[in-house]
């Protein structure tokens, strides 16, 4: 028994040593000579696979062997982490929140690098008649009225993400407050899960077009169709910011990446996803930058 | 598939080291408490209650500690595998200690007391207890490991789900779900369950070989 006990102890020690070595070797692939750039990003960009693709092109083009450490988070959490100094770059799509953190001095060197659209999606039968709406406020009013008579449900993200903030802004502009209504369901989860819930409930929701197309393409949400979209009111603007507190080599690589995003990456963004989904998931901002900046300011002021 | 393998190995290393780290603290504590310490009457029920503490809560506390602006920010541990190891070992500490206490309490009554009356020192008695209680310790370790490898909140908050660095099985599953690739998420889930089951089977084999 004494022998066996010693053997077990030895095995334990060897196993733990192996685990430490594996982790340390894994670590070595990243530091010490590899710099880690911490990038807090909105989930919709990351889950589409766009960022990993752009990162590999960036490393090729600039010859950096830095690790771009993407952390997929909601825009609210991403910005909060930036304020705490726990990110060097942020990629977000919540203009009014961005403005708040710009005024606090957390974010600097902002650039719009991509855009797409929000879409109001809902059941094919469209009980609220959203597809006949003349503008987005009318569409939301129709959902509200149909909800009040028990003919429609609306699924809200409820998580202070870029999409949720836009949804609240639209409700605010309609002058209606759906919160607390039995037909207004807050999921508190990401856009993917929210779309699935909307599909289950035969309900309406607001989504970015990229995620909707991906889920539709995979056959996850057979009941949902795009019922309303609009290229100015429902524009979804993605911006990149440098976090003021970031410094050293990390900051200079982060600056290179911003430069890459607004220049070389533009063509890559335009092509991304076309072969798989029949249309791009995101559009490059370069050619419409002035127009987009104006829309961005408009969005900040509306909120 | 290659990436799934890498993620699995990383998960096993992180959760395995978290379990070992937790054991190094909980074995001496459980030994001390099982000798009939009065503190056990308060500590053990507390630990038992804490077994179900939400992982995101521990994750958030640890994030605030390790954040650059936080009190331990200077350690630069945030977004590293080590941060996940620390978080998971805190998570499973109450679970492991509570189980070890039960195991050691009965072992102490049968062997420990006798050994001490026969003149064994504290260290000698501890080693004897560990030998006698080894199957129980292994069982506690497997349960702790299983809880650690299956948790999501800590890995997400202090690890950051960084590809090739802090992405573990659970955070990869969450990401695949948010991508809508449920098949990939399901595969990773099955890998996780297979991993936990094979560790459990391995522990049974060791126990049998050990002769208890």
Image: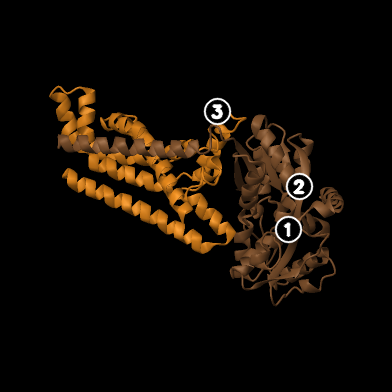
Q: Is residue A45 left or right of residue B13?
A: right
Please report whichever mark, 1 or 2, sits nearer to the chain's N-terminal start: 2
Q: Secondary structure at mark 3?
A: loop
Quarter of the figure that contains the C terminus of chain B: top left
Q: Which chain is brown?
A: A
Q: Determine which of the numbered discs, if any, sits on residue B180 in the image.
A: none
Q: Residue A133: horizontal and vertical position, in percent?
A: 82, 70
Q: Secondary structure at mark 1?
A: helix
| Number of residues whose C-alpha sits closer than 10 Å to that of mark 2, classed few (under 14), some (14–19) or many (20 or more) | some
The answer to which of B191 and B18 lies nearer the viewer is B191
Residue at the spot 74% in from the left edge and 64% down from the top edge? A119
Asked if labels 2 and 3 share a chain, the reply is no
Q: Residue A62: horizontal and vertical position, in percent?
A: 67, 42
Please give the residue where the numbered disc 2 appears in the rendered image: A262
Q: Secondary structure at mark 2?
A: helix
Task: Mark 2 and mark 3 in contact? Answer it, CB < 8 Å.
Answer: no
Residue at the spot 31% in from the left edge and 41% down from the top edge? B99
Please give the residue where the numbered disc 3 appears in the rendered image: B72
| Number of residues whose C-alpha sits closer than 10 Å to that of mark 3, classed few (under 14), some (14–19) or many (20 or more) | some
Relative to A116, say whether B106 is above or below.
Answer: above
Please give the residue where the numbered disc 1 appears in the rendered image: A270
Is residue B5 visible to us here?
yes
The answer to which of B111 and A48 lies nearer the viewer is A48
Q: CA distance from mark 2 to mark 3?
A: 36 Å
Q: Which chain is orange?
A: B
Task: Mark 1 and mark 2 in contact? Answer it, CB < 8 Å.
Answer: no
């Amino acid at each position: 028994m004494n022998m066996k006990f010693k053997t077990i102890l030895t095995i334990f020690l060897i196993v733990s040593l192996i685990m430490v070595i594996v982790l340390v070797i894994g670590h070595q692939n990243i530091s010490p000579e590899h710099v880690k750039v911490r990038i807090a990003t909105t989930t919709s960009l990351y889950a589409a696979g766009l960022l990993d693709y752009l990162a590999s092109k960036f490393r090729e083009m600039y010859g950096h062997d830095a690790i771009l450490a993407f952390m997929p988070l909601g825009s609210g959490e991403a910005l909060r982490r930036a304020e705490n100094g726990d990110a060097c770059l942020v990629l977000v799509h919540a203009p009014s929140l961005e403005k708040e953190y710009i005024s606090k001095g957390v974010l600097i060197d902002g650039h719009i690098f991509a855009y797409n659209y929000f879409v109001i999606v809902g059941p094919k039968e469209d009980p609220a008649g959203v597809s006949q709406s003349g503008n987005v406020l009318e569409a939301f009013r129709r959902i509200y009225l149909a909800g009040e008579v028990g003919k429609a449900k609306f699924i809200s993200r409820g998580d202070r993400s870029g999409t949720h903030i836009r949804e609240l802004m639209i409700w605010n502009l309609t002058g209606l407050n759906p919160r607390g209504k039995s037909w207004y369901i807050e999921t508190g989860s990401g856009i993917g899960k929210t779309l699935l819930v909307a599909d289950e409930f035969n309900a309406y929701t607001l989504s970015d077009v990229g995620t909707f197309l991906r889920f539709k393409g995979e056959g996850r949400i057979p009941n949902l169709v795009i019922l309303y979209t609009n290229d100015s009111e429902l524009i979804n603007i993605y911006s990149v910011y440098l976090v003021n507190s970031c410094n050293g080599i990390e900051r200079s690589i982060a600056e290179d990446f911003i430069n890459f995003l607004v220049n070389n990456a533009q063509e890559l963004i335009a092509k991304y996803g076309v072969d798989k989904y029949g249309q791009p998931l995101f559009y490059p901002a370069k050619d419409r930058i002035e127009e987009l900046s104006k829309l961005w300011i408009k969005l900040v002021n509306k909120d | 598939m290659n990436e799934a393998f890498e993620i699995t190995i990383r998960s096993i290393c992180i959760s395995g080291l978290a379990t070992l780290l937790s054991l190094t603290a909980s074995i001496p504590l459980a030994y001390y408490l099982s000798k009939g310490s009065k503190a056990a009457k308060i500590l053990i029920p507390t630990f038992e209650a804490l077994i179900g503490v939400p992982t995101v809560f521990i994750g958030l506390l640890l994030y605030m500690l390790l954040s650059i602006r936080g009190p331990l920010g200077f350690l630069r541990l945030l977004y590293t595998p080590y941060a996940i190891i620390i978080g998971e070992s805190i998570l499973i500490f109450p679970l492991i200690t509570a189980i070890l206490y039960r195991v050691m309490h009965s072992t102490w009554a049968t062997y420990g007391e006798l050994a001490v009356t026969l003149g064994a020192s504290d260290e000698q008695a501890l080693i004897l207890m560990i030998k006698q209680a080894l199957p129980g310790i292994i069982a506690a370790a497997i349960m702790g490991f299983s809880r650690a490898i299956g948790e999501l909140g800590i890995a997400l908050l202090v690890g950051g789900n960084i590809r090739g660095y802090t992405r573990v099985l659970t955070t990869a599953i969450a990401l695949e779900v948010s991508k809508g690739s449920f098949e990939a998420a399901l595969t990773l889930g099955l890998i996780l369950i297979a991993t936990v089951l094979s560790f459990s089977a391995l522990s049974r084999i060791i126990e049998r070989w050990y002769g208890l």
